[in-house]
Image (cartoon, rainbow, N blue to C red):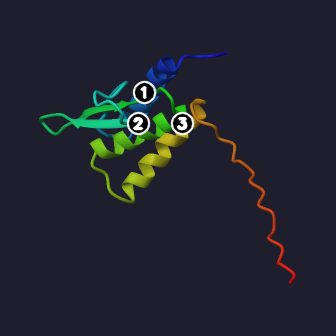
Amino acid sequence: MFFSATAQFASAARVLSQRAAELDLVVPGFRSPPRIVGVNRTIRRSRDSEGGVVAVRLTDRPFTAAVGDMIEGVVVVNQLNAPDSDHVRTALWSILSIHGYVATQEVDVHVPAVQPRVA
């Protein structure tokens, strides 16, 4: 079944928001597209420094890239540093993977062995 990028975006935003709240994080708003033409993501913090809005571009790019921008937006709005930022990224990627928004299969890349040149 095919879902539009906008419907996928809205659904992924709900899942991310719910999981961020469960992790006791500030939940940003999500929108698309960004107000600035030609950028993939913008993050606007609220005036009271609590929260913000993450805007991502959906067109002409893989949906997984947009999801990555949404996750990074949660990290930035919450001003997380390592190792907390790593734990949050992992938790958010995991929940989106469970819900089917991103592929979970690893790609098997076969790199042929380089044969030495014989002179």
Name the residue that disc number 3 marks: 64
Q: Secondary structure at mark 2?
A: helix
| Residue bearing mark 2 | 70
Q: Secondary structure at mark 3?
A: helix
- Disc 3 versus disc 1: distance between alpha carbons? 13 Å
Position of 20 compared to 49: left or right?
right
Q: Secondary structure at mark 1?
A: helix
Q: Earlier in the sequence, mark 2 or mark 3?
A: 3
Question: What's the residue at 42%, 39% (across, down)?
Answer: 69
In the rendered image, which quarter contains the N terminus? top right
Q: Nearer the viewer, residue 23 or 12?
A: 12
Task: Name the residue beneath numbered marker 1.
Answer: 13
In the image, taking residue 61 as reference, residue 31 lies left or right, namely left
How far from the left and from the top, in percent, is residue 5?
51, 21
Q: State the CA–CA distance, disc 2 to disc 1.
A: 8 Å
Please name the residue shown 78% across and 57% down the image: 110
User: Percent from the top left, x then y, of residue 107?
Assistant: 71, 48
The nearer-to-camera label among 2 and 1 is: 2
The 10 Å Cα crowd at callout 1, few under 14, some 14 to 19, many 20 or more, is many
- The residue under the point 51% across, 41% down is 93
Whichever of callouts 2 and 1 sits on the residue coming sooner in the sequence is: 1
Amino acid type shown at disc 2: Met
Q: Quadrant of residue 71?
A: top left
Q: Are marks 3 and 1 in contact (CB under 8 Å)?
A: no
Q: Are marks 2 and 1 in contact (CB under 8 Å)?
A: yes
> Residue 10's quadrant in the figure?
top left
Type of amino acid at the residue the image marks with label 1? Ala
Residue 49, numbered label:
none
